[in-house]
Amino acid sequence: MMTKWGFWRKPFRHTFDGAVYSMLHLFPAEEQEALYNRLVFESGRAVSEIGLWHLDLRKASKVDESRIICPVLVVSGAQDRITPASVVRKVAEKYNEVSTYMEFSNHAHWVIGEPGWEEITEYIFGFFKNEGLIPREEFSSDRRQFPRERIPLRSETTLRLGEQIDTIPSIIQDISLGGVRVSFPRKTDVKKETSALKTQFELSFGLPKKNDNFVLECNICRMDYTGKGICVSASFRNPKEQVLREIERYIV
């Protein structure tokens, strides 16, 4: 397809033999035809912008990797003939500060539907869970039943990554007896901290008209990425009764 001059000016559709060779070769013969019949025309322009990116003066597919701060999972199939694993590995290397690379030896291009696809979905689900991208049960059922205060409070978040300990400024967006929602200001360099923000962190803060500084250990339930930075929802882990009493007085 890409050998024909002007291919980028019009939509195109793979031939059956081309689709089988490049994408569907791990499917049984009867499924190959059914899948091919579901294929629609693709954009020649989009294909040229991705496949021949070095010739695109507008750089439509260019991505500034320094702006990507969320966890990135890069999946490849060792038997992929159209996007070889060697190419996919370079994608993971591009986002090496935030990426996780996983190559499945018994898969090719159509990883979402090939025989054995369950193995891949289980791995992806585990990745989301480990990164705190799936709300935990206690967050949806327990934390939200408590009344909470939405007045922003200045705080500090302590992250531990191995022997390294980092304390960065943060802001409590809302707090209850069950948990807290914390954001990191845009000026904070949170990119390097992302790998530490996986399961737990320590939160230090003060309450209005109180001289004491309170410290709570938190379990991350959810992590959201916005243009302004990272926002984390967390439940408290073994909070001290005295701290909970002070929070209760504050929100009531």
Image: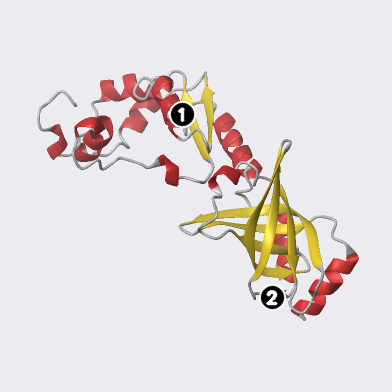
- Whichever of labels 1 and 2 marks the residue nearer the N terminus, that label is 1
Name which quarter of the figure residue 118 lies in: top right
State whether residue 11 is above or below residue 248.
above
Q: Name the image quarter holding the N terminus.
A: top left
Judging depth in this view, the residue of 213 and 247 nearest the camera is: 213
Q: Tell me whether circle 1 and circle 2 mark residues in contact (CB < 8 Å).
A: no
122 with respect to 92 (left or right): right
Disc 1 crowd, CA 10 A, few/some/many (<14, 14-19, 20+): some
Residue carrying label 2: 149
State whether residue 69 is above or below residue 44.
below
At label 2, which amino acid type do we have? Glu
Q: Residue furthest front?
A: 211
Marker disc for residue 154: none
Give the x, y percent position of residue 121. Answer: 56, 36
Q: Please report the residue visible at 18 percent of the width from the left and 39 percent of the height from the top.
A: 57
Residue carrying label 1: 93
Q: Please report the residue visible at 54 percent of the width from the left and 42 percent of the height from the top.
A: 71
State whether residue 57 is above or below residue 239.
above
Q: Residue furthest right?
A: 241
